[in-house]
Amino acid sequence: MKIAVLGVGLIGGSVGLGARQRLEAEVTGHSRNPATVERAIELGALDRGAGSVAEACEGAELVFCAGPVAALPGQAREALAASGPETVVTDVGSTKGELVGELGNDERFIGGHPLAGAETAGVENARADLFDGARWYLTPTEQSSGVHYDRLQRTITGLGARPQAIQADVHDRLMATVSHLPHVLANVLAGQAAAELTRDSERMPEVGPSFRDTTRVAGSNPSIWGDIFLTNRESVAEAIDSAVGRLQEAADLIRTGDRDALAAWHAAAGADRRRLLEADGAAEALRELRVVVSNRPGTVAELALALGEAGVNIEDMALHPAPDMKSGAISLWVSGEEQAERAVALVRKLGHTVTALDDGG
């Protein structure tokens, strides 16, 4: 397999390392900074560098666009123009709505976002195991090619990640709450504390571990986060408005002086946090579902998105086209009996024939 990586930082470099070590892929990279490409080759993240996007994409079966969020539309557009009809083009950006809105009509483009990273950036910190066990969101559209989606999700699984289809707008609302809003709150808290605690003193007072933990991400990577806020501004603003409402409710509750109500509110927050963190618990045995489908555009995306929205994650997939190419079957592997039962009911509701195979196949 030939893979192109456009933008060779932490994520792009980790894609390259994982693809070379685990998939035995040939990886070509391009960056605006030639020195970064040279260093990536030295570190084993690339087989070779390319002087342009077009050169990097030549002969590639899969292209990962890993530049800054603001640069991704242009980068992906250039990659699509330089690639043939069989090439899959994806990205690793943390906002999807604007990008998919611009490029989602091209069957070769499928947006992506790995929930993986590190405290330090740059190709020097790239790791082949960065994506192990990480959720990797994919945002196919009705125009997405099923063959292209299958190749992409198989590659991502090979990198150690857990792909899941999600609508682009749903993705952005989710990220606004669980990723982008925490940065906003950390920024606000840091600013409020600095203003309040130095009001009557020239010397900044000491702070406790709760403050340090809560504000850890405040002000991190200003240029990167500026682009993230801009490209997801509506969802982030809505999340802020919702948080303001909840803060006002908390203020009203605290003013009541009701000790029992305050303790119950605090305990409920702890329970919510545990439930959220335990959502991706131990994996259960995989069950295979065999779905008979007609050969029409968007079928794979329809199935993947519908199951993802229902909380059923496709851990693996295989396409089995019929000789006449008018129909075929899709094997879907999902985790556990309960998810398999939900998946069967949902697939049948979509009008497809589906069979849950025994563990022995």
Image (tube, helix red, strand yellow):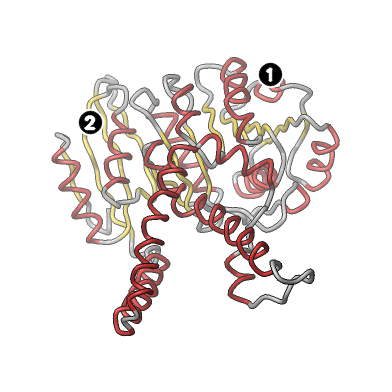
Residue that appears at 40% across and 63% down? 280
Q: Is residue 1 visible?
A: no
Q: Quadrant of the N terminus?
A: top right
Determine whether label 1 and label 2 are within 8 Å by CB. no
Q: Position of residue 103 (x, y in %)?
A: 48, 22
Q: Position of residue 73 (x, y in %)?
A: 57, 25
Please tell me in which quadrant of the rendered image residue 279 appears. Answer: bottom left
Q: Nearer the viewer, residue 303 or 290?
A: 303
Frontmost residue, 200 versus 269: 200
For the residue labelled by badge 2, is the local secondary structure a helix, a strand or a loop? strand
205 or 100, which lies in front?
Answer: 205
Left/right placement of residue 124 relative to residue 148 reads right
Q: What residue sits 63% from the left and 48% below the top?
A: 18
> Is residue 131 visible in the rendered structure shown here?
yes
What percent of the width, then of the height, locates residue 91?
A: 56, 35
Q: CA distance from mark 1 to mark 2?
A: 36 Å
- In this view, the residue in front, 235 or 8, is 235
Residue on which the image places disc 1 = 54
Q: Residue at x 57, y 28 (%)?
A: 61
Q: Is residue 178 left or right of residue 345?
A: right
Where residue 293 is drawn, which disc sits there? 2
Residue 201: x %, y % from top left:
75, 71
Seen in the picture, residue 136 relative to 328 is either above or below; the reply is below
- Packing grade of label 2 (10 A; few <14, some 14-19, many >=20) is some
Q: Amino acid at mark 2?
A: Val
Inspect the image, locate mark 1, and give the three-letter code of the amino acid beneath it: Ala
* Disc number placed over residue 185 in the picture, else none: none
Q: Does dot 1 land on a helix, a strand or a loop? A: helix
Q: Nearer the viewer, mark 1 or mark 2?
A: 1
Considering only vertical position in the picture, is 358 above or below 264? above
**Residue at position x 35%, y 80% from top?**
257
Are there few (<14), some (14-19), or many (20+) residues within 10 Å of tag 1? some
